[in-house]
Image (spheres, rainbow, N blue to C red):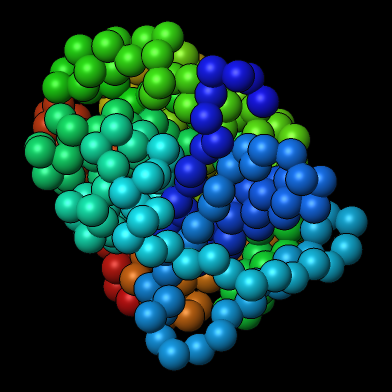
Amino acid sequence: MPNNIKPLNVVIIGQGAIGLLYYHSLRKIELLSDERKPLSTVSTSLLATDQYEDKSRAYKFTDIKNQQTQGKVQFTQPKHLQNADIVLCCVKSYHVSAAIESVVDELNPKAVIILAHNGMGTLDQLNKRVIKQHVFAAMLTTHGSLKTDSYTIRHTGEGLTQLGLILTKTQDKRANAFSGQSALQRLDFFIELLNKVLPKVVWEEDIRTAQWHKLAINCVINPLSAMLNIKNGKIADTVHLAKVNALVLEIVAVAQKESVHLNAKKLLDKVIAVAKATAENSSSMRCDVLAKRKTEIDYINGYICNLAEKHHLKAPENKNLVEAIKSLN
């Protein structure tokens, strides 16, 4: 561990599949450090919705090689928030604002908040006071994680994690003020730690374009698989290609108006490649629909529709999917 960087205090919000995946990974480092008796490099706690229930909690984890481990959950207490260096928010997009507002009064004002969720538009919903006070980053991952029971997950697929600052007009000066100092050092150290247990993790200077690529993939695979009740791989079938292509063209046109330049052909190929690579998976939106849960459609295709309206464009394919998914709930 570099001498000029103190042990990293990480709070993870959300006990879903991704939150638990990163919680387990960081706890693995912490527990190994405890066994070997060096200075601990990280301290990790989990903020969960049911942590105040009078129950003993243990998490169970099955890794990619089918090896199982378990441990007691260290839930977040006020002291963890007060000392937090990084807050990794792994909740559904429609819960992001409430989740952050619930901790911000106790949270270390220097904490970096990392948003890890499907879709876009959550930053716009946060209180301006929170935006001005904290540095925000986005995290995208293609790791597969399946939650099979409360605090029980299986790592189903290795992937790539991308991390980068979310720069807005109100944050430019604050983000630059941290250049080479504590916030960026903490993010660099966070990446270094994760690469030891859940590689590969990379820093993205242009995280916004990466977000749009993920958004486009989600705009196709999530709603189509949910509406048609099919696994991801079926999206690549010839019968669906015309609709997939129409969705991609709408997304590219909207992105262009937002000064994000996407190549329609390459994006279409990427969507099909992801569908095939995750052929046996059930998308998160399909799982939500089947379980009669609220979906993130407003932050995925709904986000495209809102921007299209803003720029006086038409996005009928995306609009139809929004209406179709909402009719299923």
Residue 323 coordinates in the image, percent (x, y): 27, 62
Residue 326 in view of the camera: yes
In this view, the residue farthest toward the bottom is 54
Q: Nearer the viewer, residue 319 or 76?
A: 76
Q: Residue at x 52, y 37 (%)?
A: 8
The N terminus lies in which quarter of the figure? top right
Q: Nearer the viewer, residue 3 or 242?
A: 3
Q: Residue at x 44, y 51 (%)?
A: 11
In this rendering, position of residue 294 left or right of residue 123: right
Q: Residue at x 67, y 49 (%)?
A: 30
In terms of image quadrants, where is residue 241?
top right
Residue 290 coordinates in the image, percent (x, y): 50, 78
Residue 245 coordinates in the image, percent (x, y): 50, 35
In terms of image quadrants, where is residue 148?
bottom right
Q: Residue at x 34, y 37 (%)?
A: 111
In terms of image quadrants, where is residue 18?
bottom right
Residue 224 in view of the camera: no
Q: Is residue 30 above or below residue 306?
A: below
Q: Nearer the viewer, residue 143 or 324?
A: 143
Q: Is residue 208 above or below residue 70?
A: above
In this rendering, position of residue 60 left or right of residue 317: right
Q: Nearer the viewer, residue 7 or 179?
A: 7
The C terminus lies in which quarter of the figure? bottom left
In this rendering, position of residue 253 left or right of residue 173: right
